[in-house]
Amino acid sequence: MCLGIPGQIIEISDINHKLAIVNIAGVKRQVNIACIVNEEYPPEKCIGNWVLVHVGFAMNRINEQQAVETLQLLKELATVQRKNE
């Protein structure tokens, strides 16, 4: 099973290598955005986009509501897991 974690692109860190800084629940990580850029969406137009991040790659764009809902579900899962430990 793959798990995509929602994050918001806040900065393009290396336009040539298609790298961006993504804020994932308050943690800033560098991720590769090559999978989500094209002629319609060049790297510089990605700032502010919400994406699903998996193993250092932004795999897909999502809307903010989807991101918020997914982050809330992940928090709930973490709470349940901690209770069961």
Image: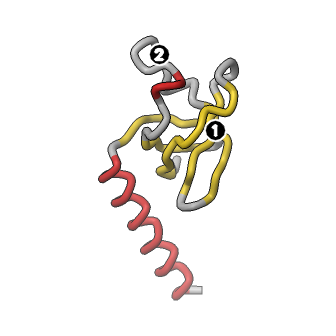
Pick whichever, 5 or 37, lies toward us.
37
**Which residue type carries mark 1?**
Val
How dense is the environment of label 2, judged by Cα within 10 Å: few (below 14), some, or many (20 and up)? Answer: few
Reading the image, the residue beneath label 1 is 31
Q: Secondary structure at mark 2?
A: loop
Q: Is residue 1 above or below residue 32?
A: below
> As drawn, is 76 to the left or to the right of 32?
left
Q: Is residue 41 above or below residue 81?
A: above
What percent of the width, then of the height, locates residue 74? 46, 65
Residue 38 is tagged as 2
How dense is the environment of label 1, judged by Cα within 10 Å: few (below 14), some, or many (20 and up)? Answer: many
Q: Residue at x 39, y 67 (%)?
A: 72
Q: Residue at x 67, y 41 (%)?
A: 30
Q: Residue at x 62, y 35 (%)?
A: 20
Q: Are marks 2 and 1 in contact (CB under 8 Å)?
A: no
Q: Secondary structure at mark 1?
A: strand
Residue 4 is tagged as none
Q: Earlier in the sequence, mark 2 or mark 1?
A: 1
> As drawn, is 54 to the left or to the right of 64?
right
